[in-house]
Image (spheres, rainbow, N blue to C red):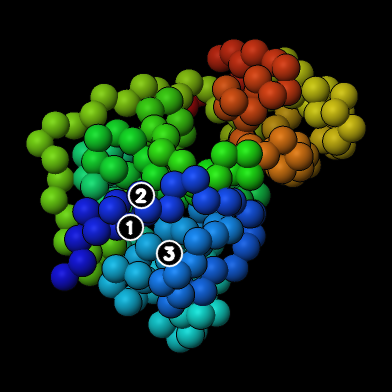
């Protein structure tokens, strides 16, 4: 049986390779060296170590050479096939996956190295990198059922990400959201009505900005996207505490 360590070891061999949002990766091509996006990278690693598809459209019904991977399909498969685990458990489990569900089209998924770090197809600016789970917003950890996992004894300490601005219910609103909208407008990107409400138009504009700057494309404004916009985040958004 394939192990979580097999996933980490394979993923580590591709650090430094190129990222391209929305690229298609043939899961059965063992010689593929990029470009990647986050879901394609994660699903390719699973297929390479286990010869089974996960996080892909149509699952086993689609040839692995054509299977489209997407964070939304990862969310579907963890509900139907996998095991959902807390973030802290995933952080201590080599080869576990950690998912930020797609809000407006784009989410993000990474591989846990078991020590609080990640291996991930990150962005056009950074490619495939080692990074950290700490200080970032995540929705769930994932164990793939046909992978054997061996959690490490020590659980990493992960920092709270603070306020992350995104589409959610109730909608986030306030002065910081208005500042985000104005900063986007100043960059020549239309966020919709300048109403101080973080809705779908604002999220789409954030994604467009993230693409233009080579950032992780998720439509959310955390510290990295905020810094690129030239603003400082606060905790005064109504409905916005994480």
Q: Is residue 197 left or right of residue 225?
A: right
Tell me if mark 1 has few (under 14), some (14-19) or many (20+) residues whose alpha carbon lies within 10 angstroms of its own.
Answer: some
Q: Judge from the rendering whether residue 146 lies leftward or rightward of residue 81; answer left or right.
A: left
Which residue position holds label 2? 12
- Foreground residue among 74 and 114: 114
Image quarter where the N terminus lies is bottom left
Residue found at x 42% / y 58%: 42
Residue 10's disc number? 1
Labelled disc at residue 224: none
Circle 2 or circle 3, nearest the eye: 2
Residue at 63% x, 39% y is 125
Please tell me whether mark 3 or mark 1 is closer to you in this view.
Answer: 1
Marks 2 & 3, CB-CB < 8 Å contact = no
From the viewer's perspective, is residue 223 above or below residue 75? above
C-alpha separation, residue under disc 2 versus residue under disc 3: 15 Å
Determine crowd level at label 3: few under 14, some 14-19, many 20+ residues with C-alpha closer than 10 A. Answer: many
State left or right for residue 96 relative to residue 135: left
Secondary structure beneath dot 3 equals helix
Spatial distance from mark 3 to mark 1, Cα to Cα?
12 Å
Q: Is residue 196 above or below residue 175?
A: below
């Amino acid at each position: 049986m394939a192990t979580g360590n097999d996933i980490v070891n394979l993923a580590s061999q591709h650090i430094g390779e190129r990222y391209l949002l929305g690229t298609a990766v043939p899961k059965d091509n063992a010689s593929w060296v990029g470009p990647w996006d986050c879901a394609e990278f994660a699903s390719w690693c699973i297929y390479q170590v286990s010869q089974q598809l996960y996080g892909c459209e149509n699952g086993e019904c689609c040839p692995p050479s054509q299977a489209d991977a997407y964070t939304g399909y990862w969310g579907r498969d963890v509900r139907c096939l996998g095991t959902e685990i807390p973030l802290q458990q995933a952080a201590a489990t080599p080869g576990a996956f950690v998912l930020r569900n797609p809000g407006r089209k784009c989410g993000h998924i990474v591989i846990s190295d078991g020590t609080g770090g990640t291996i991930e197809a990150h962005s056009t600016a950074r490619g495939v990198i080692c990074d950290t789970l700490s200080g970032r917003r995540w929705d769930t950890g994932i164990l793939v059922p046909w992978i054997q996992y061996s959690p490490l004894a020590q659980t990493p300490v992960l920092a709270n990400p603070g306020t992350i601005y995104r589409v959610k219910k109730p909608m986030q609103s306030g002065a910081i959201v208005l500042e985000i909208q104005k900063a986007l407008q100043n960059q020549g990107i239309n966020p919709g009505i300048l109403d101080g409400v973080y809705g779908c138009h604002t999220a789409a504009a954030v994604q467009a900005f993230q693409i233009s700057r080579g950032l992780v494309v998720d439509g959310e404004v955390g510290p990295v996207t905020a810094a690129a916009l030239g603003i400082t985040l606060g905790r005064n958004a109504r409905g916005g505490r994480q």
